[in-house]
Structure formats: C-alpha cells, structure tokens
Amino acid sequence: MKAPPLTALLASLTAIASSQAAAQGDETAAPPPPAEYNAKLLLTNGISAVDGASGGGIANWATIAGRQSDRGFGLQAHATFIALPDFAYQSQGVAIGIADRMELSYARQNFDTLDVGAALGIGQGYTLNQDVYGAKLRLAGDLVYGAPHMPQIAVGVQHKRNLDGAITAAVGAAHDTGTDFTFSATKLVLSRSLLLDATMRLTKANQNGLLGFGSVAGGGYSLQFEGAAAYQFSRRLVTGVEFRSKPDNLGLGEDDWFDLFAAYAVTRNLTLTAAYADLGSIATFEDQRGAFLQAQVAF
Amino acid sequence: MSLTALIPLLLVQQAPAKTVDWDAEFGVEEEVRDPVTGELPVDPYDQSNTNAGAEPISGDRMAEQFGGQEGIRIIVNRMVDLSIEDPRIAAIFEGHDHVRLRRTLFEQFCYLLAAGCDYTGRDMESSHAGLGIRKPDMNALVENLQRAMRERGVPFGAQNRFLAKLAPMSRSVVTRK
C-alpha cells in the first residue's frame, strides 16, 4: 500500500536532483576539457634552467613553468647533463606553475669533479651537491599576447643550499647558503619570430653557488645580467644564444657563461634541448666548454 | 497523503494541443537567412575598416605568401572548420551564424594582409562580447590557424608576422580569466 507513493517520492527526488545537477552543471562549469588539453602554446613554458626555474638553459626567464594557463596547475620536470673537459654537471628538478602566475621550483645540482677532485686533494670524482628552492611571480604582461612592446615581467627568489660546506669554506667562500633575487622581462616578438629575455640577478653565488656564496675577503651581493635571444624556426623548433654574467668573489677568474642552444618540442609534453655551453674557467680550470643536454616533460 | 493525491493529478495532465504555434504564442520572430548571402540579419552598426582591430600590413609580399584572396579564403574556412569541431572551443561557436563568421573573418584577414578587401564586420569588443573567451581558447584558435596556414604552405615567419597583428587583439577578445 505504501509502496507507490514511496516510489513516486524517490522518482521525483531523483528527477529533481538530476535536473538541479544539470542546471548547476550548465551554469558553473563548461564540460571538463579533453585529456589532451594543453593550455599554453608550444614552448611558451620555456625549458628548465640549471637552477630549476623555467627559462633557458642558463638564464632565468619571466616564463612560468608547466603547460597550464590561468586556471590550472602546471608541472614540469627536467634532467640536465653538461659534459665539460674537466667536470661533469648533472641536475634534475621539478617546478609547478600555479595559474600561470606563480612558479615554485626545486632543483638538485650535482657537480662531479672527476680527475680534478684528485688533483685538488678532495678525492677522485668528488661531487659537489646543491639544492635550489625557487619561487617566481609573474607581475605583469604576457609572453605572447597584449601590447607588442609589453613583455611578461616576473620577480623571483632562489634559495640555494650547498651541501658541501667544508669545500666552500676551503675555497674561501663566506657562506654555504645564499639567496638570489631576479627580475626578468621576456617577450615573444611575433613579427620577427624572436624571443627576447633580459634578467637582472642580485647574487652572492660563486659558480652558481656550487663554490659557496660571497667571500671571506669581503665579496657580497652584486648585480648581474643574464639574457637570451632566440629565433623560432617553427612551432616546435627554437634556436638561440644565452649569456649570464657572474661575479668573481673568490678571485679564481670566474667567467661569464654563454651558450648556443636548440630546443625541440618533440610532443606537447616533451622538449629536448641541446646546447654548446661555454662556462669559462671553473675553479681555475680554464676553457670549460662542452655539450649541454636536457630532457623536459611538462603538463 | 498529498503525494498519493498527486499521482492522479499527474495522470490527468494532458499534453498541449499539437496545433499551438508556440513561437507566435511567445512572440518569437523567426530569423530568415538572406536569400543572397545566406546570412542571418544583425542589428545595425557603424561599418569601418577600423573595426578590424589593427592596421594592414604594408606591402603586398604577405598577401602573396598567403596565396592572395583565394588562399586566405581557404585558410579561413579551414580554421573555422577545425575550430567548430575542436572539443576545446567548439561550444563558443555554437548558435553563431557560421556563414557570416566565415565572411567577416575572411574580410578581416584579407584587409590585415593587404590583399584588397574592406572589413565590414563589427569591432573586436562587440563581436566577442559575452562569449566568455579565455586565453587557452585563444591559444586553441591560434593552433588551428597555424595548422590551416601550415597546410597551405605559408612560411613560418609570415605566419608569425600575421599572428603579430592578431595577438594584441587579445585585450578585446579575452574577457574571462
């Protein structure tokens, strides 16, 4: 006897619930984007710089990591290898981009001294290690869109923790941790297919921090410049040059860095970069020029 | 109790008569496509080339690289075909007059590429008002346009020079975060 009304009640409740759900769905959310959704144009998340931030290979750019736009969380991860005459550098890291506004990054750098380690008496193949924690905030502008002369502008901070304090003290560095501050402006000049970047960096780091920070002799913060100019050959291929000036707090003849790079977006989510890098003199070992290779995945 | 009473009420509800003209009942006017152009009527607006949102490219090299008016028309139609089928942005085009869209986009591209057209469409603000376009939608459209240009063999540098004309329009087109 009670069954029909109950069934009717359930049916009507179900109908109401489903119609409300449908109405809410219509109002609040477009259908979820398909799985292949990549909100950014190819390569516009940059590759991963040696210190883990989105950028070029050696220069930090104003780009934000990951392939998501202003609503999503993007993620990118990289592994970089640089083969030099007397050293082998390797790093890996992850970065997340939040709403194309903020980037949080981490990179672990491992600098293998190979035979130099034995020559310096710290041990054959002694490896210097460093953790780099970064944050970057996009202040204004857009890499691709908006006014042609208004670049994407970002500020960043990078806290570096060298894990070999005994070595950094031995070479005369004042600290084994240090914090860099960056200010970057980057623009894709579509009319010329050119990507241009200029970044100012306030830093105490010796060899990016791998030889510590500052100097017991008194070297402190100095303002350094890094930048890139790259030409876009196709949607997938960009080649360019980078430059990064460095202080010489330790008086070891530390040189500025240069590279010539080619980055290729194999798929939307995989970018391979090869470069010829000239890192100059490192720990008095001159002419450290070699191949830079990076694989980056981004979502 | 009341629920039990409801069921007979539901049962006696009758379907409305099939003969009722609901459009007339609610005063809905049927839009008739223009027999010549095939377009639906639009509210009047001031026509001007300034509505195109940018100045034309100087010289006729770009028009050549895009294959003249014929090439531009193929690229526009391909871009629209790709976009109305693109699950990322298809919804934006639903309920719009695709005939008019193809014509005005052609005129705009042709005008900006200095291929000998005038633009008779609306300006970028009013033609995109209320569409709720986001930056990723713009990127999806750019990808479809790039594909259309690539398929027609437009050199990449020329593609970018044209995109450089369109990119600043994001300020009028992208209205939603």
Image (cartoon, coloured by chain):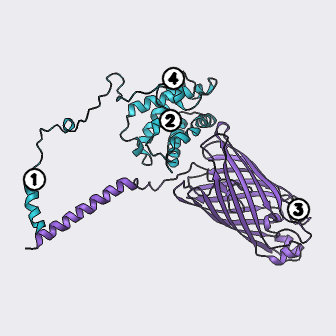
Chain colours: A purple, B cyan
The Cα–Cα distance between marks 2 and 4, rounded to whole angstroms, is 15 Å
The Cα–Cα distance between marks 4 and 1, rounded to whole angstroms, is 58 Å
Numbered mark located on residue B124 in the image: 2
Classify residue A178 by image quadrant: bottom right
Q: Is the residue marked by circle 4 packed among few (<14), some (14-19), or many (20+) residues within 10 Å?
A: many
Q: Which of pointers 4 and 1 lies earlier in the amino acid sequence?
A: 1
Q: Chain of mark 3?
A: A
Q: Which of pointers 1 and 2 lies earlier in the amino acid sequence?
A: 1
One can see residue B64 in this view: yes
The residue singled out by tag 1 in the image is B13
Numbered mark located on residue A248 in the image: 3
Residue A145 lies, in percent from the top left, at 59, 43
The residue singled out by tag 4 in the image is B118
Q: Nearer the viewer, mark 2 or mark 3?
A: 2
On the same chain: label 3 and label 1? Answer: no
Secondary structure found at label 4: loop
Secondary structure found at label 2: helix
Residue B91 lies, in percent from the top left, at 40, 45
The Cα–Cα distance between marks 4 and 3, rounded to whole angstroms, is 61 Å
